[in-house]
């Protein structure tokens, strides 16, 4: 057992768990943060994306001990912020959500991208989302959603 | 039972290596996938792991006397954007995996994993990289080429860790990087070609060609490279068929789920040819 201290969605959390346990399982099973989805479980689809210290990571292959002292943001935290609402509204408007399974991961990838490039080119958006798979939309609507969030959120990012 | 350690320093990490036989764990992007089990079940790692990704001592990039020192646990996302590093290495890092993976995956892990398809390894082989390895008895330096002995096997000893990758400066500016995979992101290479060259006053003064995933180890044929040094572009252009024939003899790819041996061989030779042709033609125009 390891004792892990970190912040999740702004609150300090102490976790007692084997260190190699996947962050994904801790977030979903212990903390009820079910926006974090498991798709492939091996780093390929991005459904489990969260931010660690502002950077996009896949929680399905991240052992919980590796987030010691870190700041984790999931969609549950992001959606309470103006930035989060900006992306969510833009996704809704451009029809970027169909079944919704990939959406939390896509929103987190969009947030990570916009934190780094406040005014991304289409190419930068496509690279930013390249680790996230969507079986429904064909991606173009998601790319438009991110572009709209960048435009509308000027000053936010 | 402790299954994972979070050392406070490199010295402590080395102690855990020696005393507990802990497995080095950097980004974990190879280890967590290799030993994964069903959702909710702990990964079945073959022993306790020692986390390295957070250690400042392994996360620095420095330049001393013209030599670049890259910490073994620097994430790929940092490698791809550090302009002090050779463009060939940055290109290969920027095309590995996906943004989320690149935020945690490391060159030390790519080397430790020793996959014939490792993209970082291929670029580093073309750059004549050396490794600094620390152990309980002090540290040693070894070339990457010697260190990797075959698919998944290296000369790392039980008490050791890779601490840094070192690169000498090179004059090569004709950088060529091609990775062939099924998808742009998150695809392991079917094959890759990392090459670069330097041309001065109409003469090729340096040339390196590394072919990835076409043999048990990255393929670099230094005798051929040596024989091309000092050639003019016209001379190079005449030698291309012979050079490709020599590579063809040493390319021993395998069939696997990602690709076939025949595809790998043909594509690697065509890409090597493209590099050589560009080099010969570009100079003719000058
Ligand atoms: C979805 C996906 C896509 C991928 N795409 C690519 C790709 O495009 N190209 C590519 O080359 N690879 C790819 N990989 C493989 C992997 O991401 C890389 O090999 C990466 O560089 C491994 O680094 P890591 O830090 O995560 O390694 P880890 O998993 O932490 O370690 C890998 C191995 O190296 C050893 N090790 C780690 N650090 C050290 C050290 N300092 N000293 C000694 N031994 C050490 C470990 O014990 C282990 O055996 C991909 C993996 C996934 C899951
Ligand atoms: S579930 Fe983590 S990347 Fe697919
Ligand atoms: S909306 Fe269904 S997977 Fe993307």
Image (spheres, coloured by chain):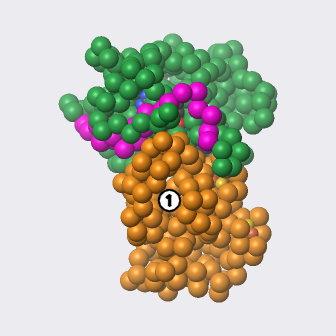
Q: Which chain is orange?
A: A
Q: Which chain is green?
A: B
Query: Tag 1's secondary structure?
Result: strand
Q: Is residue A72 left or right of residue B193?
A: left
- Asked whether B202 or B221 is in front, the reply is B221
Tell me what residue is drawn at x 58 percent, y 27 percent.
B46
Tell me what residue is drawn at x 77 percent, y 64 percent.
A135
Q: Where B49 sits versus A56, above or below?
A: above
> Chain under label 1?
A
Quarter of the figure with residue B221: top right
Density class for disc 1 (Cα within 10 Å; few <14, some 14-19, many ≥20) is: many
Q: Where B150 sits versus B286, above or below?
A: above
Q: Position of residue B231 (x, y in %)?
A: 47, 22
Looking at the image, the residue that sits furthest to the left is: B65
Magenta span of residues: B42-63
Q: Where B25 sits versus B80, above or below?
A: above
């Amino acid at each position: 057992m390891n004792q892990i201290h970190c912040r999740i969605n702004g609150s300090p959390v102490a976790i007692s768990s084997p260190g190699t346990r996947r962050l994904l399982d801790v977030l979903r099973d212990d903390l009820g943060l079910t926006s974090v989805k498991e798709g492939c479980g091996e780093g390929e689809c991005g459904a489990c994306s969260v931010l660690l210290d502002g950077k996009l990571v896949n929680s399905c292959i991240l052992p919980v001990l590796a987030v010691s002292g870190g700041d984790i943001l999931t969609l549950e935290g992001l959606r309470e912020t103006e930035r989060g609402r900006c992306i969510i509204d833009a996704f809704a408007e451009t029809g970027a959500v169909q079944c919704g399974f990939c959406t939390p991961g896509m929103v987190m990838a969009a947030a990570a991208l916009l934190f780094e490039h406040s005014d991304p080119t289409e190419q930068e958006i496509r690279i930013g989302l390249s680790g996230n798979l969507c079986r429904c939309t064909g991606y173009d609507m998601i790319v438009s959603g991110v572009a709209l969030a960048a435009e509308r959120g000027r000053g936010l990012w | 039972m402790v299954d994972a350690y979070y050392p406070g320093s490199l010295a402590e990490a080395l102690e855990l290596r020696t005393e507990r036989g802990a497995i080095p764990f950097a980004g974990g992007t190879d280890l967590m996938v290799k030993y994964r089990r069903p959702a909710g079940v702990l990964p079945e790692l073959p022993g306790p792991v020692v986390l390295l990704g957070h250690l400042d001592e392994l996360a620095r990039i420095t330049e001393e006397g013209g030599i670049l020192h890259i910490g073994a646990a620097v994430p790929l996302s940092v490698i791809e954007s550090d302009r002090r590093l050779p463009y060939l290495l940055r290109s290969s890092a920027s095309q590995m995996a996906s943004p989320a993976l690149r935020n945690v995956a490391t060159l030390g892990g790519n080397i430790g994993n020793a996959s014939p398809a490792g993209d970082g390894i291929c670029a580093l082989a073309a750059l004549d990289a050396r490794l600094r390895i620390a152990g309980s008895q002090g540290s040693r330096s070894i070339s990457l080429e010697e260190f990797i002995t075959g698919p998944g096997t290296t000369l790392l000893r039980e008490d050791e860790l890779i601490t840094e990758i070192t690169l000498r400066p090179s004059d090569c500016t004709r950088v060529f990087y091609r990775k062939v995979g099924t998808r742009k992101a998150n695809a392991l290479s079917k094959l890759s070609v990392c090459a670069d060259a330097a041309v001065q006053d109409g003469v090729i003064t340096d040339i390196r060609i590394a072919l990835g995933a076409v043999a048990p180890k990255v393929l670099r044929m230094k005798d051929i490279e040596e024989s091309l040094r000092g050639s003019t572009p016209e001379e190079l252009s005449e030698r291309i068929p012979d050079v490709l024939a020599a590579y063809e003899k040493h390319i021993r790819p395998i069939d696997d789920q990602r690709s076939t041996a025949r595809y790998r061989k043909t594509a690697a030779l065509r890409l090597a040819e493209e590099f050589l042709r560009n080099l010969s033609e570009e100079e003719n125009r000058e």
